């Protein structure tokens, strides 16, 4: 099959046939015939091309709770898509088979077909996920704009290394309405350098500020990794930053680590560690949820006023909705900041298409 290829968005032509990519915070300067750090963007005679355009390596229908987005159109279904590669080198990645793949593999699916597939599968939105959507921003932009025109929403699951230019570009096209921004190790800079080959964490905070400025709804996750990234001080600092810059009502997910890829010798995060981390983060934020712990009470949304469970969950599913039509606590009337609408009876588990 012919390789999908499109001239890249958001790059600058330099002297000597070099180009500089402005999609992610690495801002790679790429000589002619060379590739960026992500291996899917190539300088061909002074022009930058996205080699992965519409070359999808994963297509699934997911409950939005898998992203996880819990206060954005809860109960809805999303068509989840990805291309290969990433701009991080996380040693613990659970999608490493595609995120670290350097061969451009997958199925050619143009923007029109992506939107058609979402509608055929009765999805309310499209999520760009599994790898890093920043590195396949061209299809995110083109499919996202078309999806919005067809009444669908668009969300990213991202490591937050997109530039402000990328966030603005997406927002102006109405191609991005919500994002899950994934921190690891409490945002500790040494953790990122050692385990993800990321030189600085500051661009992630800049990306979050850009999303807020552009009116993109955000939930934040943090992977709690035993031994390497489970500092309660780091989690407290991250929660404080979220409160000060995004707002106390921002949903913050503390995710349980499980052994994978190059960190198979590290045990899963103890439940007690997650519970302590949640207690620390709750000093700053109203909605701190535990992830990857099905059946734990920390999966639920609680009313900040009366402390009653207003949304009860099991894993990806909403199992009890204790809110009025205008999203007020049925016990005390406190307004819970739900974005969009609730879709009762949504998917409980993912459904694979590709």
Image (cartoon, helix red, strand yellow):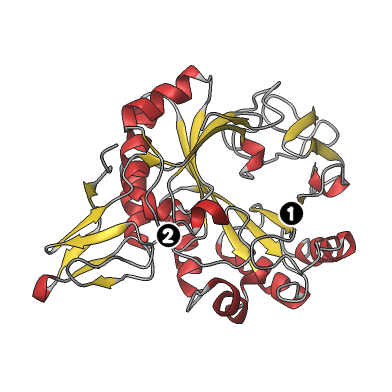
Percent x, y for residue 301? 77, 43
Percent x, y for residue 241? 61, 69
Q: Is residue 15 above or below residue 65?
A: below
Q: Quick one: SS at disc 2?
A: helix
Q: Residue at x 67, y 70 (%)?
A: 185
Q: Quadrant of residue 46?
A: bottom left
Percent x, y for residue 131? 50, 52
Q: Earlier in the sequence, mark 1 or mark 2?
A: 2
* Residue furthest out toward the front: 1
Instruction: Left or right? Give the position of 17 relative to 125.
Output: left
Percent x, y for residue 235? 71, 70
The answer to whether one can see residue 303 in this image is: no
The answer to whether one can see residue 213 in this image is: yes
Q: Determine the CA span between mark 1 and mark 2.
A: 22 Å
Instruction: Left or right? Give the position of 89 relative to 341.
Output: left
Q: Is residue 237 above or below residue 322?
A: below
Q: Which residue is the site of mark 2?
A: 210
Q: Which mark, residue 175?
A: none
Q: Residue at x 41, y 58 (%)?
A: 102
Q: Quadrant of residue 164?
A: bottom left
How many numbered marks does the figure carry? 2
* Residue furthest out toward the right: 272
Q: Nearer the viewer, residue 59 or 9?
A: 59
Q: Nearer the viewer, residue 182 or 208?
A: 182
In the picture, the quarter occupied by the N terminus is top left
Q: Residue at x 34, y 42 (%)?
A: 139
Q: Residue at x 52, y 26 (%)?
A: 124
Instruction: Left or right? Give the position of 56 relative to 255.
Output: left
Q: Which mark, residue 286?
A: 1
Q: Is residue 296 above or below residue 283?
A: above
Q: Nearer the viewer, residue 15 or 155?
A: 15
The crowding category of the residue bearing disc 2, from other C-alpha atoms within 10 Å (few below 14, some 14 to 19, many at least 20), is some
């Amino acid at each position: 099959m012919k390789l999908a290829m499109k001239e890249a968005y958001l790059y600058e032509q330099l002297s000597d046939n070099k180009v500089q990519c402005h999609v992610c915070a690495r801002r790679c300067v790429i000589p002619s015939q060379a590739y960026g750090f992500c291996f899917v963007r190539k300088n061909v005679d002074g022009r930058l091309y996205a080699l992965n355009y519409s070359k999808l390596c994963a297509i699934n229908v997911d409950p939005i709770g898998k992203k996880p987005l819990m206060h954005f159109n809860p109960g809805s279904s999303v068509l989840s898509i990805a291309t290969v590669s990433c701009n991080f080198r996380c040693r613990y990645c659970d999608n490493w088979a595609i995120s670290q793949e350097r061969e451009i593999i997958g199925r050619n699916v143009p923007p029109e077909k992506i939107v058609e597939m979402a509608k055929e599968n009765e999805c309310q939105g499209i999520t760009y996920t599994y790898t890093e959507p920043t590195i396949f921003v061209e299809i995110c932009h083109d499919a996202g704009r078309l999806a919005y025109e067809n009444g669908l929403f668009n969300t990213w699951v991202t490591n937050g290394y997109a530039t402000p230019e990328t966030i603005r570009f997406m927002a102006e096209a109405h191609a991005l309405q919500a994002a899950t921004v994934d921190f690891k190790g409490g945002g500790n800079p040494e953790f990122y350098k050692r385990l993800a080959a990321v030189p600085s964490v500051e661009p992630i905070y800049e990306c979050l500020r850009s999303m807020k400025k552009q009116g993109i709804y955000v939930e934040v996750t943090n992977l709690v990794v035993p031994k390497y990234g489970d500092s309660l001080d780091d989690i407290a600092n991250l929660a404080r930053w979220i409160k000060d810059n995004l707002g106390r009502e921002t949903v913050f997910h503390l995710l349980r680590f499980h052994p994978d890829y190059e960190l198979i010798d590290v045990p899963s995060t103890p439940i007690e560690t997650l519970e302590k981390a949640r207690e620390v983060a709750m000093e700053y934020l109203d909605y701190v949820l535990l992830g990857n712990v099905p059946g734990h009470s920390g999966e639920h949304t609680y009313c900040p006023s009366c402390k009653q469970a207003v949304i009860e969950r099991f894993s990806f599913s909403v199992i009890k909705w204790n809110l009025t039509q205008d999203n007020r606590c049925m016990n005390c009337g406190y307004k819970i900041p739900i974005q969009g609408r609730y879709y009762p009876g949504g998917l409980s588990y993912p459904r694979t298409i590709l």
